Image (cartoon, grey):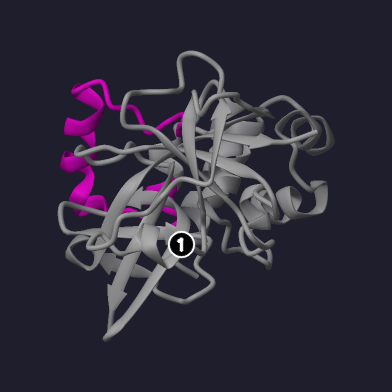
Amino acid sequence: MKGEKKELKDLVSDAIGDKTVTEFAKEADLNRSYLSSLKNGSEPYDPKPEILKKIAKNSKKVKYLDLMIAAGYIKFSDFSYYKGKINNNISISSPPEPKYGSVKNTENNGGVKSYNYNNEAFWDEKQKCVSEEHFNFPEGYVTDSSYALKMTNNEFKDLGIIKDDYILIRPTNDEPDNGSTILVVIRKGGVCRRTIKRYYIINNDKVRLEPDVENYGEIEKSEIEIKGLVVYMGRKY
């Protein structure tokens, strides 16, 4: 268990408020039995940040930051760092999520260039990678440096991304907002892995990447290279 059970239990209870567990679970798209276990402090009792986000989003009393601290994802000693982020209008109470929709091929090579996710030339900056397709994405999501990647398997189905989906990437030099979905290269223990994760800030030096199927846990920022933000997930129909 990552945090203080009583504190997190009380926060979940406050979030539910006068509603029944069934009512709150339905509104927040949560499993009723699991939400009840969080409220009562019984096992299982190790909620992922995505669960805490849903609880905070559907509560007028409890903040996502407080839940993250109570669950142990953020150390209370780092609170001033997060408070500064909030004061700078970088909110972590509503993590940005990619939009979903359909995409269409464009004619005459117009639109956004698309590459195959498993194309080694794309990941090797020393080589020139030729785009394989071009697509139109909704206005407002595309920048001059945007590009798309075609997914080749169901590795990221937990993020809602399946084989043959096209994800729109927006390169960035800034640190992503807490909860952003990112395209990232992880270099840890001599192993290089390219993947898609949700980005959760721990402090100035460390982050947590979810889903944590590789059991990285907290990881140094120096061990990751953020290629860009996943801002749109498209599917051909």
In the rendered picture of this protein, how many numbered marks are placed on residues?
Answer: 1
Q: In the current view of this chain or complex, which residue is farthest to the bottom?
A: 190
Q: Is residue 29 left or right of residue 64?
A: right
- The residue closer to the viewer here, 124 or 217, is 124
The residue located at (17%, 42%) in the rendering is 81
Mark 1, secondary structure of its residue: strand
The residue under the point 67% across, 66% down is 44
| Residue 81 visible in the shown view | yes
Magenta residues span: 68-96
Q: Quadrant of residue 105?
A: top right
Q: Is residue 166 above or below residue 122?
A: above
- Residue beneath disc 1: 195
Indicate the position of residue 94 as horizontal and vertical percent values: 47, 29
Q: Residue 182: where, in percent of width, then height?
A: 41, 47
Query: Could you say where residue 53 lies in the image, as x and y percent from the top left?
Result: 54, 39
Residue at the extreme top = 139
Residue farthest front in this picture: 108
